[in-house]
């Protein structure tokens, strides 16, 4: 019998051409109606989530930010960042329609034909700050991840206007700008506990001087248990603000051994997590926590994280306010762009990136 389109693509070298070069991504693969997961996506056993390690009775905190300057709210935020590195916020001040619009825009972008999306691929994108791709680093990964992404690094409105995809640009910019107050508030709360009295311009740049937004797409997967939507990693950001839809599938490492906790979709909420840069600046007081995404066998999922980062040219290390109080530094000063390059040189590998800055 002649091979079907699907078997021809998954069993031959046409695979990279179809998925990567032509820009069909995993969405294109999924839409072929494959019955079996292509071998390129089969993760080794130790990288598949073991459902017996998922703690259904545990959950990360959900914090109501309505009275954001109330001491109890501030305490809850700081305690959650110390204990869990992950929490959800509601009444966060980002209008719900802005969140809905950016989710719609994400679906609109992924609904475009492959050749349209491929105009933003590494090879073809007119700007280094706009990148459509699949998996994480296909050239460095032994097994691929079941995810497509559009990654947008914000430089200026003019640059975004010229180079970001018109199908989603306005909604993404609005989401980014409407989240700024929340990010600023959270960082002010968190750094106050680190003895930072005032966030001046230099501190603002260090904490949130550059912003990256990803539009993630996790299509229906024929064998979700054999692969990963995103493998175990921590973010390189200071803070990540993540908008997820109502499908679920994000898991964060629990406090005990190899345990994992699901982050259930909560309507109107945003998920906040501490990234490596804040772990380093806080000298380990706040911890970036490993997380991963499970693929889904029956539904397409999207998520839209905003990564608030130092600027590439910033040196990051334990904050002087902590060292002045007599803390022994656990991390050295590193150039943030070197740190990020190190992260993007390798496949997802849990929290190993942080070793780059350890003393
Ligand atoms: O899709 C998600 O829920 C998480 C994605 C993620 O961890 C990331 O993009 O860094
Ligand atoms: Fe992440």
Image: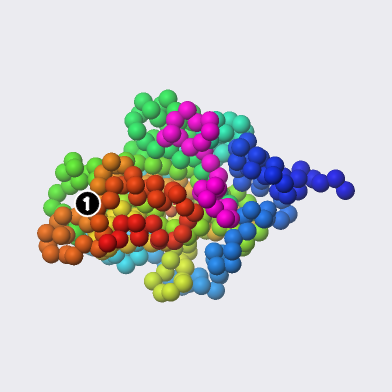
User: Viewed as shown, does residue 155 lie left or right of 299?
Assistant: left
**Depicted 207 relative to depicted 266: above or below:** above
Image quarter hosting the C terminus: bottom left
Question: Residue 249's spot in the image, x, y percent?
Answer: 52, 58
Q: Which of these two is toward me, 329 or 179?
A: 329
Name the image quarter holding residue 127. top left
Q: Is residue 149 visible?
A: yes
User: Viewed as shown, does residue 330 lie left or right of 220?
Assistant: left
Name the image quarter holding residue 25. top right
Residue 281 lies in the magenta-colored region: no
Q: Main secondary structure of the magenta part?
A: loop
**Depicted 152 relative to depicted 348: above or below:** above
Question: Residue 132's spot in the image, x, y percent?
Answer: 52, 38
Extreme residue toward the right, this view = 1
**Depicted 177 relative to depicted 35: above or below:** above
User: Viewed as shown, does residue 17 lie left or right of 96?
Assistant: right
Residue 123 lies in the magenta-colored region: yes
Q: Which of these two is toward me, 260 or 2?
A: 2
Q: Within 10 Å of the Cα at label 1, are there few (<14), some (14-19), or many (20+) other Cα atoms? A: some
Q: Is mark 1 within 8 Å of ligand 2?
A: no
Residue name at image x 45 percent, y 46 percent:
304
Question: Residue 327's spot in the image, x, y percent?
Answer: 17, 64
Residue name at image x 34 percent, y 33 percent:
155
Q: Which residues are magenta?
A: 122-145
Residue name at image x 76 percent, y 48 percent:
7
Q: Which of these two is toward me, 35 or 277?
A: 277
Q: Is residue 269 visible?
A: no
Q: Which residue is mark 1?
A: 188
Question: Residue 333's spot in the image, x, y percent?
Answer: 24, 53
User: Viewed as shown, does residue 15 lie left or right of 189?
Assistant: right
At numbered mark 1, what does the secondary structure look like: helix, strand or loop?
Answer: helix
């Amino acid at each position: 019998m002649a091979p079907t389109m699907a078997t021809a693509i998954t069993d031959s070298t046409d695979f990279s051409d179809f998925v990567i070069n032509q820009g069909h991504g995993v969405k294109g693969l999924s839409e072929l109606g494959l019955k079996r997961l292509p071998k390129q996506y089969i993760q080794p056993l130790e990288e598949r989530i073991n459902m017996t390690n998922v703690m259904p009775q545990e959950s990360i905190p959900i914090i109501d930010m309505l009275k954001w300057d109330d001491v109890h709210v501030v305490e809850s935020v700081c305690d959650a960042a110390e204990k869990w590195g992950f929490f959800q916020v509601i009444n966060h001040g980002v209008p719900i329609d802005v969140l809905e619009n950016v989710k719609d825009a994400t679906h609109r972008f992924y609904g475009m034909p492959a050749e349209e999306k491929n105009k933003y691929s590494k090879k073809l994108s007119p700007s280094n700050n706009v990148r459509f791709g699949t998996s994480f680093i296909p050239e460095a990964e032994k097994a691929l991840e079941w995810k497509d992404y559009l990654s947008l690094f914000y430089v200026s409105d003019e640059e975004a206007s010229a180079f970001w995809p018109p199908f989603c640009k306005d909604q993404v910019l609005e989401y980014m700008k409407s989240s700024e107050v929340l990010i600023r508030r959270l960082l002010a709360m968190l750094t106050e506990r680190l003895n930072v009295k005032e966030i001046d311009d230099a501190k603002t740049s260090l904490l949130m001087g550059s912003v990256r937004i990803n539009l993630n797409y996790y299509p229906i997967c024929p064998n979700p248990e054999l692969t990963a939507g995103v493998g175990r990693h921590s973010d390189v950001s200071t803070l990540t603000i993540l908008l997820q839809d109502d499908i679920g599938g994000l898991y964060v490492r629990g406090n005990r051994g190899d345990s994992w906790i699901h982050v259930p979709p909560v309507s109107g909420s945003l998920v906040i997590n501490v990234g490596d840069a804040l772990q380093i600046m806080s000298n380990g007081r706040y911890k970036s926590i490993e997380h991963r995404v499970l693929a889904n066998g029956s539904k397409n999922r999207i998520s839209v994280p905003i990564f608030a980062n130092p600027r590439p040219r910033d040196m990051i290390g334990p904050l002087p306010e902590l060292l002045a109080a007599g803390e022994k530094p656990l991390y050295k000063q590193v150039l943030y762009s070197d740190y990020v390059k190190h992260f993007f040189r390798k496949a997802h590998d849990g929290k190993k990136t942080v070793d780059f800055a350890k003393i």
